[in-house]
Image (cartoon, rainbow, N blue to C red):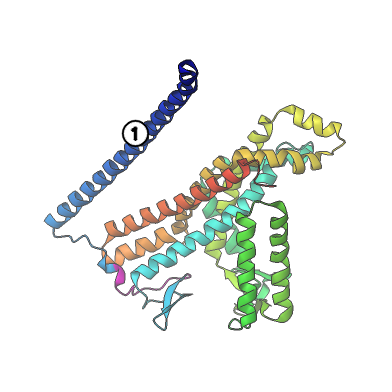
Amino acid sequence: MTLEHTNATGPTVERDLTVARRRRNRIRYHATQLAVVAAALALVVLFAVAVKEGLARHGIKFSFSFLWDAAGFDISEGKTFVFDSGFWLVFNEFTSDRSIAQAFVAGIVNTIKVAVLAILLSTVLGTLLGVGRLSTNWVVRNLSFWCVEFVRNTPLLIQLVFWYFAVVLHFPPIAAAAKFYGVIISQQGLYVPALTWRREGSAVAIALASACWVAVLGLIFDRHRTTRWICLGALVALPSLMLATGILALDFPVASKFQASGGTSISPEMAALLLAIVFNSASYIAEIVRGSIDALPKGQWEAAASLGLGRRDTVNDIILPQVFRVVLPSFGNQYISLTKNTALGIAIGYPELFNIYGTIANQTGHSLEGIVIVMVSYLILSWIISAAVSWADRRLSNPGAMR
């Protein structure tokens, strides 16, 4: 009985010791991380106190109270958050009587607007160029190669100046604007159709809009393939139903002799900045995609050929799904760099965050406080992009994510 008891309890004791050791290691790991964070925060606080005292000795006050003062200047384009009737938070155009804090918000909104569009467009264009680099067609392969090499080996600022002064400002005047399926291209900007609410206060409109948001959340967070297809179908059917019932309507732009009205517009400065960033980022994304495709085993191509798949089906159904499981971290780095590159909009007068900071610093003299806000804003945007890419990477890496 004693021998059996010893044999039975021996593994149990060893297992308990292993669990206790792992617990101690985990506690030590978290304690170390907390100590590092605390030390970093202490250094930041000490630096901030030293800077504040140094400024005080020179009669300079370090304070963020200026954010609530009236801006006193206009912004060529940009919307900000305002309180409607003192309670509802709505999105409205920025005017000179808004606060400086709202001017910063308008700059952040303009930055996010360019960054989101550039991320979407550069991903699509970069993937096409990356696949084109490996095309069996000599013209497509070499055209993709020279496009990528030319863009990657010239500074982004020069490309931005080229797109603005040599392309966008040479668009036709509004009286002779180019029109293409409701899209108007002119020197005053790009005008595209926009969706507008016709019965935004009705219960049906609220219910259908809520259903759209539920479908979006289901498409993002649900792991089951059937549910995702249902949500995707709902996202197609619900807006179509709202258009058919008149809840939503397409507002097409109309050009007159001197200006265009209706729809939504993209200013020449935003168009040039968007074009420069999209083509520049797409060239780097193309190299990421090309390198990832080259890194795949050649047996993938051979197995697809043995099944009778053509090159297009092989790329779409076999190669690219594997590539996107690998390239997301590299894409995330490029997206963060892309977002920070929007600050170059100051070179052509686009009112993004850094440009508006310069105006505020000249008006108020609070340049240090302003640059702190700008740095923190870009830091938060980078964290959001990093978290979104990490979440997508975990979902794609999860074997059960697409059941």
Q: Is residue 240 above or below residue 373?
A: below
Q: Residue at x 23, y 49 (%)?
A: 45
Based on the displayed image, in which of its 4 quarters is residue 154 positioned?
top right
Of residue 368 and residue 397, the one placed in the foreground of this image is: 397
Q: Would residue 52 be found to the left or right of residue 26 on screen?
A: left
Q: Position of residue 67 (x, y in %)?
A: 30, 68
Q: Residues within 10 Å of mark 1 (few under 14, many from 20)?
A: few
Would residue 14 be visible to someone looking at this image? yes
Of residue 102 and residue 321, the one placed in the foreground of this image is: 321
Q: Position of residue 158 (x, y in %)?
A: 51, 49
Q: Residue at x 24, y 45 (%)?
A: 42
Q: Is residue 354 above or below residue 8?
A: below
- Which amino acid type is shown beneath numbered disc 1? Arg
Q: What residue occupies the far top of the structure in this picture?
A: 3
* SS label for mark 1: helix
66 within the magenta span: no
Q: Which residue lies under the disc numbered 1?
A: 28
Based on the displayed image, in which of its 4 quarters is residue 314 positioned?
top right
Q: Is residue 59 above or below residue 37?
A: below
73 within the magenta span: yes
Q: Would residue 333 be found to the left or right of residue 37 on screen?
A: right
Of residue 25 and residue 239, the one placed in the foreground of this image is: 25
Q: What residue occupies the far right of the structure in this picture?
A: 308
Q: Residue at x 61, y 65 (%)?
A: 214
Would residue 350 be visible to someone looking at this image? no
Q: Is residue 342 above or below residue 180?
A: above
Q: Position of residue 293 (x, y in %)?
A: 68, 35
Q: Which residues are magenta?
A: 67-78
Q: Residue at x 68, y 78 (%)?
A: 249
What secondary structure is the magenta-colored segment mainly? Answer: loop
